[in-house]
Image: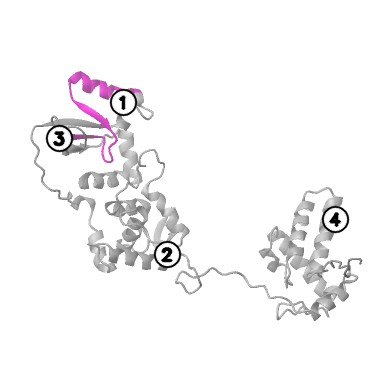
């Protein structure tokens, strides 16, 4: 018995009518004219034409076509001028798009052969509504929401938000003033990169601007909290111990100058049989443009018999350390004693005063 063979099925290609035949026709004309003149604009018209044919809705004006790819101000203006001319030549032309469908397809179809029959069949079929996708809200009402952005305490963005909240000038804060106000609230420097990194705590300002928490205005730039940023800053200030949540009361505390900053109290440590060693920052020995002259500093210390060690210092260039004699490893206790020295050349000092690094470094030296 022969096997049963069912009816052969053939895929039928769906013919989609042109939603904007006039615009497509004019773009094709301009493309052909540019190709005849051997102009490179033919490629621009070709890309715009492909983008227009992929768009499923009717465009009322050329300005609306700017939402499409490869449609600039020039092409949109040309379409509007051509459409205005077409309306003057055809007073009966009416474009009515109320429900998102091409109800005036007959008017468009009269310009090209065979378009009226296609638009007639298209009107008889219901059109799928195209709605833009919306991101789910972060409050959990739209499924799996996006986690809210909350910076870590004593971090760069945390310090910037709280400093802007507590700043007395609510009309905006410059970068130099903001660094001075935010540095006591942050564990990392706003001007000096840590280790081998190129980024400072100020680099987090780009994140705050991108998330819409801070707005930058004017020249020179002044930074202002947005409504979302002020709301987040109030929450951060409320959860941080010792920080007031009221803006007017905190403004008085933040208005004090860096001259009134007192050193942080530390516990008293008693060491016996100690020796004092000079600590030299590694940047002061062999790095930078003046590496040859900096190497002379270490040679001079050896010549004078000053016991020293080269380390990476987070604050200052020179410091003195007391350590126990005869102890090594983790059991050896060390204590910073005496002042911390920051070496400055004359030109570097002048530049640091102009860009605000001088005040920021002075605050760090007084609070270390």
Per the rendering, the mark at residue 322 is: 3
Task: Give the vertical position of 128 relative to 165 (above or below).
Answer: below
**Which mark sits nearer the N-terminus, 2 or 4?**
4
Give the CA distance from mark 4 to mark 3. 85 Å
**Which mark sits nearer the N-terminus, 3 or 2?**
2
User: Marks 4 and 1: in contact by CB < 8 Å?
Assistant: no
- Label 2: state its secondary structure: loop
Image quadrant of residue 314?
top left
Crowd class of label 4 (few under 14; some 14 to 19; many from 20; radius 10 Å):
some
**Which mark sits nearer the N-terminus, 1 or 3?**
1
User: Marks 4 and 2: in contact by CB < 8 Å?
Assistant: no
Residue 217 seen in this snapshot: no
Query: Which range is magenta?
Result: 292-321
Give the CA distance from mark 3 to mark 2. 46 Å
Give the CA distance from mark 1 to mark 4. 70 Å
- Label 3: state its secondary structure: strand
Crowd class of label 1 (few under 14; some 14 to 19; many from 20; radius 10 Å):
some
Q: Is residue 41 left or right of residue 152?
A: right
**Which mark sits nearer the N-terminus, 1 or 2?**
2
Residue 191 seen in this snapshot: yes
Per the rendering, the mark at residue 294 is: 1
Q: Residue at x 18, y 34 (%)?
A: 320
**Residue corresponding to mark 4:** 32
**Which mark sits nearer the N-terminus, 4 or 3?**
4
Task: Give the vertical position of 330 relative to 69 (above or below).
Answer: above
**Residue corresponding to mark 2:** 148
- Which sits in the foreground, 120 or 32? 120
């Amino acid at each position: 018995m022969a096997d049963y063979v069912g009816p052969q099925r053939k895929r039928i290609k769906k013919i989609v009518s042109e939603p904007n035949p006039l615009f497509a026709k004019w773009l094709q004309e301009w493309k052909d004219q540019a190709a005849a003149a051997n102009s490179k604009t033919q490629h621009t018209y070709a890309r715009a034409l492909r983008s227009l044919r992929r768009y499923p809705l009717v465009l009322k004006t050329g300005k609306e076509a700017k939402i499409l790819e490869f449609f600039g101000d020039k092409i949109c203006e040309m379409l509007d001028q051509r459409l205005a001319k077409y309306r003057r030549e055809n007073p009966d032309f009416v474009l009515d798009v109320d429900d998102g469908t091409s109800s005036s397809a007959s008017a468009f179809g009269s310009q090209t052969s065979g378009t009226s029959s296609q638009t007639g069949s298209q009107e008889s079929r219901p059109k799928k509504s195209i709605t833009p996708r919306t991101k789910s809200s972060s409050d959990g009402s739209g499924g799996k929401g996006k986690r809210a952005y909350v910076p870590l305490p004593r971090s760069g963005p945390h310090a910037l938000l709280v400093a802007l909240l507590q700043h007395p000038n609510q009309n905006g804060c410059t970068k130099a003033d903001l660094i001075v106000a935010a540095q006591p609230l942050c564990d990392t420097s706003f001007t000096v990169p840590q280790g081998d990194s190129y980024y400072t705590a100020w680099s987090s300002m780009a994140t705050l601007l991108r998330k819409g928490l801070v707005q930058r205005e004017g020249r020179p730039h002044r930074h202002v909290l947005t409504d979302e940023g002020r709301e987040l800053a109030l929450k951060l200030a409320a959860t941080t111990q010792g920080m007031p949540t009221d803006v007017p009361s905190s403004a008085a505390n933040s208005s004090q100058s860096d001259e009134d900053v007192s050193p942080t109290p530390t516990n008293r440590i008693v060491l016996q049989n100690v020796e004092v060693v000079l600590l030299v920052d590694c940047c002061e020995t062999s790095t930078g443009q003046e590496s040859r002259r900096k190497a002379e500093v270490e040679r001079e210390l050896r010549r004078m018999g000053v016991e020293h060690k080269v380390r990476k210092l987070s604050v200052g260039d020179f410091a003195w350390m007391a350590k126990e004699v005869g102890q090594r490893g983790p059991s050896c206790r060390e204590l910073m004693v005496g002042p911390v020295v920051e070496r400055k050349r004359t030109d570097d000092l002048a530049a640091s005063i102009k860009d605000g690094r001088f005040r920021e470094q002075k605050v760090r030296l007084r609070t270390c």
